[in-house]
Image (tube, rainbow, N blue to C red):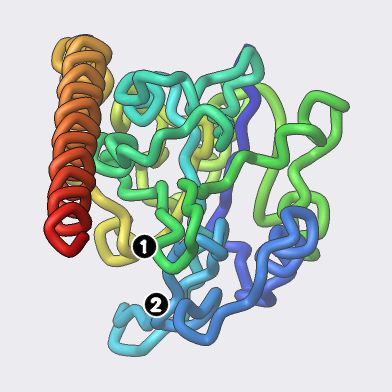
């Protein structure tokens, strides 16, 4: 059964404990170019989770809302279906993990993800793709993800996805302030991070035009051809290599003959 997290945005005070815990656990650096909080907060190669601030106008007054963002860990991950080297895969726990040693840097996962989550280390000599992996080694040891474990206001609840959906529906039924929608229940075929809000999700930066049909259904048909194309491209590169090698060898031999001729004439 997939593990998941229910995020109740009505409880978030924007303290930042979650992204601090994420940075510490994953040993990610802080960057001035990519803030982890505030109105300009954005996911980046070093930011696997952020808390973005929104100023919402409601009932003739302004209200602040804070939204924690990270990988949604889809039930049917398009990033994994697009990855022909299995660098990205879904585990039995429902966590989408990434293995950099298998990655070839094609970045198809970035194109395939409907939520635009995976990021690329553009500034590094040997770049890899990065994203939240839900503290996978904590999950398999029956521990909560680090961000969940430090939240002082219980914004996040960790558990089995099916049970979290039941809890989310109970909260909606018992409190009219909630929007009658659980974000992640059906989006892109369902995600393991689920959200509740008292503000329309579109006003909080959530993509609301995502189909309920898994994005992987669109990518798998075409990406199944990728290994064939990759192999063909490998043959092309190999051919180019040997052609260049042959040309260099011929050029070297001609240069040697020219040197020998000049040497003989000088003698």
| N-term mark: 2 or 1 | 2
Residue 211's place in the image compared with 132, above or below, is: above
Task: Name the spot of residue 63 as percent of width and height, x first.
Answer: 43, 82
Q: Quadrant of residue 237?
A: top left
Label 1 SS: loop
Q: Is there any visible trace of residue 217 in the rendered image?
A: no
In this image, 214 relative to 121: left or right? Answer: left
**Whole-Å distance between the Cαs marked 2 and 1?**
11 Å
Q: Quadrant of the N terminus?
A: top right
In this image, 134 relative to 62: left or right? Answer: right
Q: Quadrant of residue 5?
A: top right
Q: Which residue is mark 1?
A: 199
Q: Which mark is residue 54?
A: 2
Q: Nearer the viewer, mark 2 or mark 1?
A: 2
Looking at the image, which residue is at 23% across and 46% down? Answer: 256
Residue 105's place in the image compared with 127, above or below, is: above
Task: Name the spot of residue 115 as percent of width and height, x first.
Answer: 32, 45
In this image, 264 relative to 176: left or right? Answer: left
Task: Name the spot of residue 131 as percent of width and height, x first.
Answer: 52, 48
The image shows a total of numbered marks equal to 2
Q: Are marks 2 and 1 in contact (CB under 8 Å)?
A: yes
Q: 14 or 239: which is nearer to us?
A: 239
Judged from this view, the residue extending furthest toward the front is 267
Q: Which mark is residue 99?
A: none
Looking at the image, which residue is at 51% across and 21% down? Answer: 89
Residue 195's place in the image compared with 197, above or below, is: above
Q: 110 or 246: which is nearer to us?
A: 246
């Amino acid at each position: 059964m997939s593990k998941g997290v229910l995020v109740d945005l009505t409880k978030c005070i924007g303290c930042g404990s979650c992204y601090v815990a994420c940075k510490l656990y994953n040993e990610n650096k802080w960057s001035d170019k990519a803030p982890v909080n505030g109105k300009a907060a954005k996911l980046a190669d070093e930011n696997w989770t952020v808390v973005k601030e929104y100023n919402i106008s409601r009932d003739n007054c302004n209200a602040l809302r804070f939204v924690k963002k990270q990988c949604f860990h889809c039930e049917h991950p398009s990033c994994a279906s697009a990855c022909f080297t299995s660098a990205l895969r879904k585990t039995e726990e429902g966590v989408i993990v990434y293995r950099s040693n298998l990655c070839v840097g094609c970045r198809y996962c970035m194109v395939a993800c409907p939520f635009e989550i995976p990021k690329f280390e553009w500034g590094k000599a040997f770049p890899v793709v990065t994203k939240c992996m839900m503290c996978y080694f904590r999950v398999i040891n029956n521990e909560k993800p680090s961000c969940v474990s430090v939240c002082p206001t219980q914004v996040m609840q960790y558990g089995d996805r099916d049970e979290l959906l039941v809890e989310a529906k109970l909260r909606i039924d018992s409190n009219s302030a909630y929007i009658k929608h659980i974000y992640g229940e059906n989006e892109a075929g369902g995600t393991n991070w689920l959200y509740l809000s008292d503000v329309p999700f579109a006003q909080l930066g959530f993509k609301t035009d995502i189909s309920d049909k898994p994005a992987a259904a669109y990518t798998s048909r075409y990406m199944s051809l990728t290994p064939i194309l990759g192999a063909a491209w490998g043959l092309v590169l190999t051919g180019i290599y040997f052609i260049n090698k042959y040309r260099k060898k011929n050029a070297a031999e001609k240069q040697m003959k020219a040197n020998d001729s000049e040497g003989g004439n000088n003698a």
